[in-house]
Image (tube, helix red, strand yellow):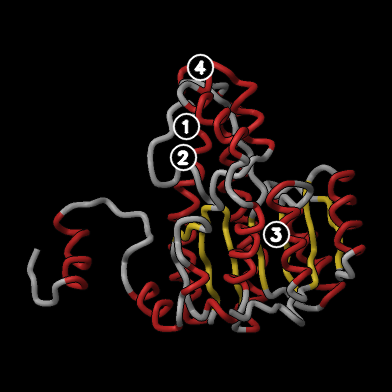
Amino acid sequence: MNQRLDNRVAIVTGAGRGIGRAIAEELVRNGAAVVVAARNVDELEETARLLRLRGGRCLAVPADVADPRQVGALVETTLKEFEQIDALVNNAGVLGPIGRLVQNDPQQWMRTLEINLAGPMIGMQKVLPHMIERRQGKIVNMSGGGATAPRANFSAYAASKAALVRLTETVAEEVRTFNIQVNAVAPGAINTRMLEQVLEAGEAAGAETEAARRQQEDGGASVEMAAQFIAFLLSESSGELSGKLLSAVHDHWRNWTNADLARIGRNSWLTLRRLDAHTLSPFVEELAPGCVC
């Protein structure tokens, strides 16, 4: 599988640590020039230092993804430095308030949506005019836990990630004719700062506390696999696959052929759907042509 990104320029938000840093490292490893963004300047500069030690072309730009002016400056700085933007990874995110909804601080709850949902919206809004003009581009929005099932005691996080998937699907349709692909990715249960926050929350996290302890002991999912999957989606190897919620852990993406990509792309699986007679009818037709649901 060829996922080289030579002569490509990618912006990665939330790249000061954790998954964002791992993604930036993987993109550099595959030949891309990377612009890393985060609010914590010290962490951001450490990421940039590591990327440069690996011989990567890298630019660090402090930015709050929920601030349109700062994101606009991030995009403008990238274009001034590299003259193009081929990819955007909206990775920045927060866990938000932990505990039952009635216990949550409303301002913290709304701030979670500002970062996790409005942040990617602003990022896409700022880079898409450039991508549309060039008639090419790849965007990945980091989704995950909470997007496909209820997540008690994490309502702000779950709501923001579910909404992000639907936003991804919608924007993907809007830009499909411009050869721009937009997908959401579930990276897996990776041991990051968010896991530490769950453990620190104790009883407020409910049943997730014990699951977090087990994950910490087991080591969690591979951050390298998640980063490699992102690189695959940003490369030509992913073809025109767009508008899907994809799993770095559970989807067998390493074995996908061009025929697999075409099949996945044209059907309605791997999207947010209510399961009833109306929404299931296209699925039934795919599995049993001619059948009326």
Pick the residue in front: 107 or 101: 101
Which residue is at 38% across, 61% downward?
270
Determine the CA span between mark 2 and mark 3: 24 Å
Residues tagged 1 and 2 counted as in contact (Cβ below 8 A): yes
The image's mark for residue 155 is 1
Q: Quadrant of the N terminus?
A: bottom right
Q: Quadrant of the C terminus?
A: bottom left
Q: Residue 292: image x %, image y %?
A: 7, 68
Which amino acid type is marked by label 3?
A: Ile
Pointer 2 with pointer 3, Cβ within 8 A: no
Q: Position of residue 188 (x, y in %)?
A: 54, 49
Q: Earlier in the sequence, mark 4 or mark 1?
A: 4
Give residue 98's mark: none
Q: Mark 3 — residue? A: 23
Earlier sequence position, callout 4 versus callout 2: 4
Q: Is 129 above or below relative to 146?
A: below
Q: Is residue 269 left or right of residue 221?
A: left
Look at label 1 and name its amino acid.
Answer: Ser
Which residue is found at the position 36% from the left and 54% from the top? 272
- Judging by the rendered image, the residue that carries numbered circle 4 is 103
- Look at the numbered disc 3 and give the secondary structure of its residue: helix
Which residue corresponds to mark 2? 159
Mark 1 → mark 3, Cα distance in angstroms: 27 Å
Identify the amino acid type marked 2. Answer: Ala
The alpha-carbon separation of the residues under discs 1 and 2 comes to 6 Å
The alpha-carbon separation of the residues under discs 4 and 1 comes to: 11 Å
Q: Are marks 4 and 3 in contact (CB under 8 Å)?
A: no
Res. 11 image quadrant: bottom right
Pick whichever of labels 1 and 3 is earlier in the sequence: 3
Q: CA–CA distance between discs 4 and 3? A: 35 Å
At which x and y percent is residue 212? Answer: 56, 30
- Mark 4–mark 2 Cα distance, whole angstroms, equals 16 Å
